């Protein structure tokens, strides 16, 4: 039995709302605690490291034993424990807390994405409507980022609200079916078939580089705003502008994917990152800095719905959770891990503007991977046609 679409919308809302209350202000919080750029980079690396280590295991367990509900509950409990350690404030506790937080949240995105795509595959729905369900998470991310930006200026710790939202996410996880009715499934043949697909290598390369830039933006924009001498509300406004455009993209994602096809949509998303990061590095006016983030709708919104859709279309049904976990591990695992390390080095050596200049170069690499993906899909004769 699959969860209802209203339950899935609420889960996205509360789960991603927690991220909106935590992630945009995490870099500034650590810097205010007196940590250096190298230390912040090392701590931030715990987030992608936790995802990278745990995501493939979560996906394999979900596909093998049809136990998504159990895994969601365990993951939520781990994330809450990690957040409580992070609230303690000491660097050692923060490192362990960030790792547990990331490892616990690793199954939430891929498993719920997989379940949502399955729920939309029944008669009367269309898997390309995924964005209309997922957008409620973006709405919550936007709303709680704005609220917490104002709260941070008033001296309130956004992590407290984030912890409350994580507890609400845990409660909703208990509404999911504990496990499926089928026994253990043989998934190795399906995984081998997936690994032989021509789209996989360029897609994972694109996911790694695109998410590298996006994760750096998520965690270091507040640091850059702080270095420019601007208030925390500028960070909140920038995030709100970007996510508002992301919501619009997800709302109208179905006709976009039908017209362009997922591979070409991914190329558009990668190309949008080049001017976005260059301007973020060089612009110092707060209004202009906020306005630039409208490109987030393309750089993340289109990237995410097209990547999830392409993986869903090409992966065997037996490994739906594992394939989404692979996409997640490549993007916000490998990509975000190297992004945290690279951004920490650039911050320590050349300042915060250099972080986003570096992301401009990385986006050029993402664009090359996306072009390779389009070329391989065209060569294989499977580039999606307009519907």
Image: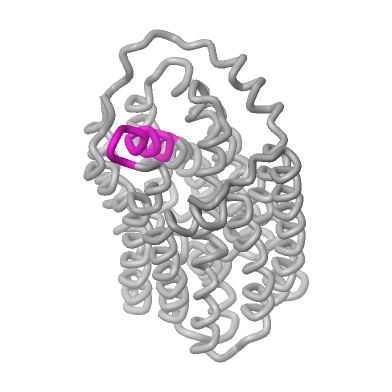
Q: Quadrant of the N terminus?
A: top left
The answer to whether residue 50 is seen in the rendering is no
Residue 311, by quadrant, is: top right
The residue under the point 68% across, 50% down is 206
| Between 40 and 23, the one nearer to me in the picture | 23
In reply to whether residue 122 is colored magenta, the answer given is yes
Give the side of residue 353 with respect to residue 171, left or right.
right
**Nearer-the-camera pick, 292 or 334:** 292
Q: Is residue 296 left or right of residue 85?
A: right
Residue 212 in percent (x, y) is at: 65, 55
Residue 155, position as x, y percentages in the image: 34, 74
What secondary structure do most residues of the magenta stretch adopt? helix
In the rendered view, would you say 115 is above or below 36?
A: above
Scheme of colours in the image: one colour
Residue 95, compared with residue 73, is above or below; it is: below
The residue positioned farthest toward the top in the image shown: 183
At horizontal 76% and vertical 50% (from top left) the residue drawn is 372
The image shows residue 39, relative to residue 356, as above or below, that is above
Please name whichever residue, 202 or 52, is drawn nearer the observer in this view of the structure.
202
Q: Nearer the viewer, residue 262 or 336?
A: 262
Q: Is residue 59 located in the magenta-colored stretch of the structure?
A: no
Chain part drawn in magenta:
111-125
Q: How far from the left and from the top, in percent, is residue 6?
A: 22, 45
Residue 369 seen in the current view = yes
What residue appears at the point 25 percent right and 46 percent down from the top-left corner? 168
Task: Give the left or right position of residue 314, taking residue 244 as reference.
Answer: right
Residue 285 image position (x, y, % from top left) = 56, 91
Count of marks overlaid on the render: 0
x 44%, y 23%: residue: 62
């Amino acid at each position: 039995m699959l969860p209802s679409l209203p339950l899935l919308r609420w889960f996205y809302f509360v789960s991603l709302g927690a991220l909106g209350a935590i992630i945009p202000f995490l870099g500034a919080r650590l810097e205010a605690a007196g940590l250096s750029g190298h230390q912040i980079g090392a701590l931030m690396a715990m987030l992608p490291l936790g995802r990278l280590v745990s995501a493939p295991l979560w996906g394999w367990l979900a596909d093998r034993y049809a136990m998504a509900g159990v895994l969601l509950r365990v993951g939520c409990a781990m994330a809450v424990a990690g957040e409580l350690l992070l609230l303690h404030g000491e660097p050692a506790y923060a490192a362990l807390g960030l790792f547990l937080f990331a490892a616990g949240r690793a199954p939430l995105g891929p498993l719920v994405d997989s379940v949502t795509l399955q729920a939309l595959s029944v008669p009367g729905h269309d898997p390309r409507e995924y964005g209309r369900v997922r957008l409620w998470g973006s709405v919550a991310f936007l709303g709680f980022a704005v609220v917490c930006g104002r709260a941070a200026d008033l001296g309130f710790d956004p992590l407290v609200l984030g912890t409350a939202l994580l507890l609400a996410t845990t409660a909703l996880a208990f509404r999911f079916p504990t496990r499926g009715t089928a026994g253990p499934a043989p998934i190795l043949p399906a995984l081998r078939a997936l690994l032989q697909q021509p789209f996989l290598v360029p897609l994972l390369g694109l996911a790694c580089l695109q998410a590298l830039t996006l994760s750096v933006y998520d965690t270091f924009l507040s640091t850059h705003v702080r270095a420019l001498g601007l208030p925390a509300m500028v960070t909140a406004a920038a995030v709100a502008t970007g996510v508002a455009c992301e919501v619009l993209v997800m709302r109208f994602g179905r006709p976009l994917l039908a017209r362009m096809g997922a591979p070409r949509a991914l190329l558009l998303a990668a190309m949008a990152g080049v001017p976005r990061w260059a301007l973020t590095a060089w612009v110092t006016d707060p209004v202009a800095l906020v306005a630039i983030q409208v490109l987030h709708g393309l750089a993340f919104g289109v990237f995410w719905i097209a990547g999830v859709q392409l993986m869903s279309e090409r992966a065997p049904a037996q490994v739906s959770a594992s394939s989404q976990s692979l996409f997640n591990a490549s993007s916000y695992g490998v990509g975000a891990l190297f992004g945290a390390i690279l951004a920490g080095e650039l911050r320590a050596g050349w300042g915060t503007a250099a972080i986003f200049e570096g992301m401009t170069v990385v986006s050029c690499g993402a664009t090359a991977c996306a072009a390779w993906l389009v070329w391989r899909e065209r060569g294989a004769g499977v580039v999606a046609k307009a519907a």
